Amino acid sequence: MLTALVIIFVLAYAAIALEHPLKVNKTASALIGAGLLWTVYALLGGDHHLVSENLKESLAATAQIVFFLMGAMTIVEVVDAHNGFHVITSRIKTTKITSLLWLVGFVTFFLSAILDNLTTTIVMISLMKKLLDRHDDRLFFAGIIVIAANAGGAWSPIGDVTTTMLWIGGQITSVAIIKGVFPAALACLVVPLIFLNFTLRGKEVVSPVIIENGSDIKTTPFEQNLMFFMGIGCLVAVPIFKAVTHLPPFMGILFGLGILWLVGEILHRNKEDEFKEHLTLVAALKHIDMSSIVFFIGILLAVATLEHTHILTALAQWLDTTFGRQDIIVTLIGLLSAIVDNVPLVAASMGMYDMATYPTDCFLWEFMAYCAGTGGSILIIGSAAGVAAMGLEKIHFFWYAKKIGALAALGYFAGIFVYIIQFKLLHG
């Protein structure tokens, strides 16, 4: 059974990677892969009750991420419908594309630490559509946004799911992870930025031509500002909501979406229906990219079978037996997170290494937070941020692998070098 599961997963993964030449949408490949994996598991797993329980558990975890994604994308769409991003775009005056690249990289890096890498990616890619007309330019920016969002999430206890898992599990503390991983995460961003700076050097920013919609649909500066700050406020409030209530993030995003919906209804209640139609949450829900969301469901459910059948745990144990050294094992786990979801990899690692031997804030856990958080940038489907970018900007797997993957790998290894040197200097 395990061999069959691995073969199906590899074939589904290959079909997703070869979406363009095969002319088969990646969402179809992900859903078929998930369906086949769970079918094989159900038929050959033996214990039907256990399979059902595992599926319920995976569905609950997947639904949390999907609801969060839907909420965040809808909030961004509502802000966009009100021309809310004009609040930012009107203040960016640079005409040099390299200056904009550095600005976007650092804004994404720090925003990701406050929000999380998935939400930040959605917000920043939506913003780039307002700033850049050429799709080729936006693809490079989407690549640096993915790298920056994952690097920014790695040094914050609320910036990435895996860092949050280690934080909640007691493996790391918030102050120690910020001090320990920040320099490495910064190197992970700066190195790709330096190289990409040469690729885009000499280009000018080409902004989209704004076409007026006949006479009519405009929003006032007050409406733009209100919906922009309300939308960003709802996103920023999610980690605070989670910290205070201990409820999962999707509940906070749905709560925020409800508040934004109410504010929009009150704001436009005296307007004609035809005028306010495109400003409503109902219209925003129609515009979100459901194909990306369904792809997300497929890929998460597919990876879940590898977790439940202990394939990932066995892989982690094999690494431990074969290599023995913590730094090599964790580096490889980071590289593996570019292929499979980093959440089950980190979960398996947390189960493998007990805290009596590896106490809070030791080398293993901090290095794990960095590698698992940033290694996923090497391939476009290696992180939630990458999957979101792939859907929003229609990025092809091999384009990203060729143009961005090597830069992300350089940044990844630069950060590893910085972390190990820093650790040796501080801990003798």
Image (spheres, rainbow, N blue to C red):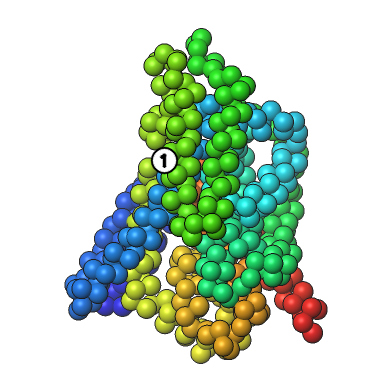
> Is residue 219 placed above or below 377 in the rendered structure?
above
* Residue that appears at 19% across and 73% down: 48
Q: Is residue 61 left or right of residue 178?
A: left
x, y percentage for residue 386? 52, 53
Q: Is residue 79 left or right of residue 98?
A: left
> Is residue 277 placed above or below 3 in the rendered structure?
above
SS class, disc 1: loop
- Name the quadrant containing residue 36: bottom left
Q: Is residue 325 left or right of residue 100?
A: left
Return the residue nearer the eye: 61 or 238: 238
Furthest toward the front, the residue is: 244
x, y percentage for residue 58? 34, 64
* Residue that appears at 69% across and 57% down: 189
* Residue that appears at 72% across and 33% down: 92
- For the C terminus, the image quarter is bottom right
- For the N terminus, the image quarter is bottom left
x, y percentage for residue 235? 55, 45
Q: Residues within 10 Å of mark 1 (few under 14, many from 20)?
A: some
Residue 173: tell me if it is visible.
yes
Q: Which residue is mark 1?
A: 289
Q: Amino acid at mark 1?
A: Asp
Tally the marks. 1
Residue 398: tell me if it is visible.
no
Return the residue nearer the eye: 147 or 423: 423
* Residue that appears at 43% across and 51% down: 251
x, y percentage for residue 274? 40, 15
Return the residue nearer the eye: 312 or 408: 312
